[in-house]
Amino acid sequence: MDKSSIIGSLLGVVVCVGTAFLIVGHGGSWGMFWSLKGVLMVFGGTISVVFMAMPMERLKQVPGYIKRFMTNKQMSPTETFDMMGRFSDKARRDGILALESEVEQVDDDFLQQGLKMTVDGSDAYVIESTMRLQIMAMQERHKAGKKFFDLVKLYGPGYGLAATLIGQIGMFGSLGTGGVEELGAMLAVAVTATLYGTLLANAVAGPIGDKLSLRSGEEMLSKEMMLQGVLSIQAGDNPRSTQQKMLAFVPKQQRLKLAAAA
C-alpha cells in the first residue's frame, strides 16, 4: 500500500467529519448534510459526463486506476540500479545466455521481456523499438486514468452549480406561496449540492488525478532506466559503464550514495 495515499485519504476524512461534528455540536444535525436531490444531480450528472466523454473500454479500467493510486509496486531506482549492475556483471563474466536463469525471477514484465530478447540474441534496434512501443502504449493508458479523474474534477462542481441553480429557481418560484420550511428545503438542496461538487473535485478526483500523473512520470523514467540497462547489457558494456548510465536517472543525493557503494 502507498502510505502517503492512505494517510492523505484518512486525514481528509477526519478533517471533513471533524468539522461536521463541530457544527452538529453547536445545534446542528447530521440530516442537514444530506440531500438526495443533490446526490442525484452531482454524482449522477458526473457519471453521465464520464460515460459521454470516455469509451467503455477505458471505464472498465477505473478500478485499476484506483488500485494504482492506493498501491505502488513500482521498482525503485535503487533496486533497478542494483539489479542491472548484477545482470551486467554476470553477462560480462559468464555470457549473455547466463541470464536465462535470472529472467524468470524478475518481477517486472517490461524488464523481463527486454532481458528475454537480449538472451535470444535480438538486435539492439529491435529491442529498443519494441520496448519503446511498450512505453508509448503505457503512457497512453496512464493518460486515460488521469483523464477520468480530470473529467470528474471538472464537471462535478459544474453539476453542483446546476443543482444550486435549480434549487434557487424552486426557492424563488415559491416566494409568494411557499412557507419557510419549503423555502429552506430548496435552499438546502442548493447549498448541499455545491458542497458535494466541491468535495468530489477537491477532496477526491483532483488529488487522485495528480497522484496518478506523478506515478506515470516516475514509471516512465523507471522504464527508460531499464531500457538503457538492457541495451548496455546487449552491447556487452563494462558493468561499471552500465551502472554509470543508470546513475543518470537517480536524484543527485541518492546518486552519490549509489556511486560510493558501487
Image: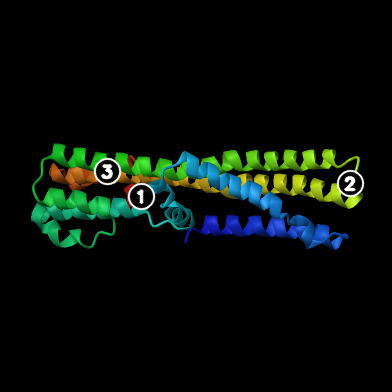
Quarter assignment of residue 108: bottom left
Name the side, left or right, on which 154 lies relative to 124: right
> Are the two marked residues, 3 and 2, in contact with CB atoms closer than 8 angstroms?
no
Name the side, left or right, on which 43 lies relative to 73: right
Check disc 2 and report the residue beneath it: 178
- Of tags 1 and 3, the one toward the viewer is 3
Q: Residue at x 40, y 44 (%)?
A: 142
Q: Residue at x 43, y 56 (%)?
A: 72
- Of tags 3 and 2, the one toward the viewer is 2
Check disc 1 and report the residue beneath it: 77
Q: Is residue 81 above or below residue 165?
A: below
The answer to whether residue 68 is visible is yes
User: Measured from the top left, where is residue 247 in percent x and y?
Assistant: 32, 43
The amino acid pointed to by label 1 is Pro
Q: Secondary structure at mark 2?
A: loop
- Of tags 1 and 2, the one toward the viewer is 2
Q: CA distance from mark 1 to mark 3?
A: 19 Å
Q: Residues within 10 Å of mark 3 (few under 14, many from 20)?
A: some
User: Measured from the top left, where is residue 254 in percent x and y?
Assistant: 40, 47
The amino acid pointed to by label 3 is Gln
Q: Secondary structure at mark 1?
A: helix
The amino acid pointed to by label 2 is Gly
Q: CA distance from mark 1 to mark 2?
A: 66 Å
Q: CA distance from mark 3 to mark 2?
A: 63 Å
Mark 1 or mark 2: which comes first in sequence? Answer: 1
User: Measured from the top left, where is residue 219 in percent x and y?
Assistant: 37, 46
Q: Is residue 84 above or below residue 29?
A: above
Check disc 3 and report the residue beneath it: 134
Mark 3 or mark 2: which comes first in sequence? Answer: 3
Mark 1 or mark 3: which comes first in sequence? Answer: 1
Say the numbered circle drawn on residue 17: none
